[in-house]
Amino acid sequence: MTDPNRPTCTICHRPLWADEWHRFACRQCERRIADHLDHLPDLIHDLHGLLTPGSRRALDGPIARSSAEPPAPIRLDILDRITAAAAVLDTWLADWHDHLQWPSPTYRTDPLAEAAAALRTNLPWAVEQHLAIDDFAQEIADLHSDATGLLDPGKRARRIGHCPAPAPDDPAQACGAVLRYVPGAATVTCRWCRTTWDAIDLGAALALAV
């Protein structure tokens, strides 16, 4: 039986091991955040290949066009995603610098990649010291999921049911928030109560709830 007084991860809410009690996030969640930060710059840069309607990913190479053909309009939805990703990383890095009483971050050539790298480097500090590490983890996961879904529609998050975990404000009731699963992911996290499920265990729980 789980000790109700045992500290839990603020991201997945699983009990922390004894050697993790000084942390706000477990090592598994830290590794997941680190993986997202490692891959996010390439994913966002690849979105540039979708800026022109009908274009393929930048990795597939440019599409030949007639010189007489007028340029296609820019996809503003994709441009918004690219801009938002850079803004989110920069905002969090500035916040971390403020907490550490460091000067505001500066960039040389690629703000998005440099911000991601700096956040990745300082992640061990954040999981131990930053009270909002759960919000940071969710925002980075959302950026990663959105970019992955745009580049590969087969990996787009899909609605799979409603969260069966106890509601944060009334444990006697189920949370009930919509759950979305990214194909191939090992876990599913409820955006409302922040419960993180093993994908196989969640499948079984949802089947029993039907």
Image (cartoon, rainbow, N blue to C red):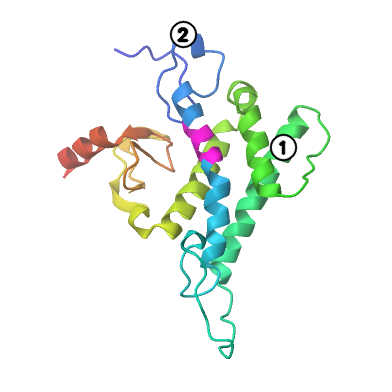
Q: How many marks?
A: 2
Task: Note whether 115 is above or below 127 in the view shown.
Answer: below
Q: Is residue 91 above or below residue 169?
A: below
Nearest the viewer among 140 and 159 is 140
Q: In the image shown, does 43 or 10 lie closer to the viewer?
A: 43
Query: Mark 2 highlights which residue?
Result: 18
Which sits in the foreground, 16 or 50?
Answer: 50
Q: Earlier in the sequence, mark 1 or mark 2?
A: 2
Residue under the point 58% across and 70% down: 76
**Residue located farthest toward the bottom when viewing the structure as drawn:** 68
Secondary structure found at label 2: helix
Question: Residues at badges 1 and 2 in contact (C-beta under 8 Å)?
Answer: no
Cα distance, mark 1 to mark 2? 29 Å
Left or right of 147 on screen, residue 200: left
Residue under pointer 1 = 95
What residue appears at the point 83 percent right and 34 percent down from the top-left corner?
A: 103
**Label 2 Cα neighbours within 10 Å, binned few <14 / some 14-19 / many ≥20:** few
- What quarter of the picture does the C terminus occupy? top left
Q: Tell me where residue 197 appears, x and y as whole percent.
A: 33, 33
Give the left or right position of residue 116, taking residue 99 as reference: left
Query: For the point 40% across and 23% down, which residue is it?
Result: 14
Who's the residue at 44% across and 52% down the image?
Answer: 148
Left or right, 184 with reference to 205? right
Query: Which segment did they paint magenta?
Result: 32-38
Considering only vertical position in the picture, is 22 above or below 81? above
Q: Amino acid at mark 2?
A: Ala
| Element carrying mark 1 | helix
Q: Amino acid at mark 1?
A: Asp
| Whole-percent x, y for residue 45 in the image | 58, 55
As drawn, the residue found furthest toward the right would be: 103
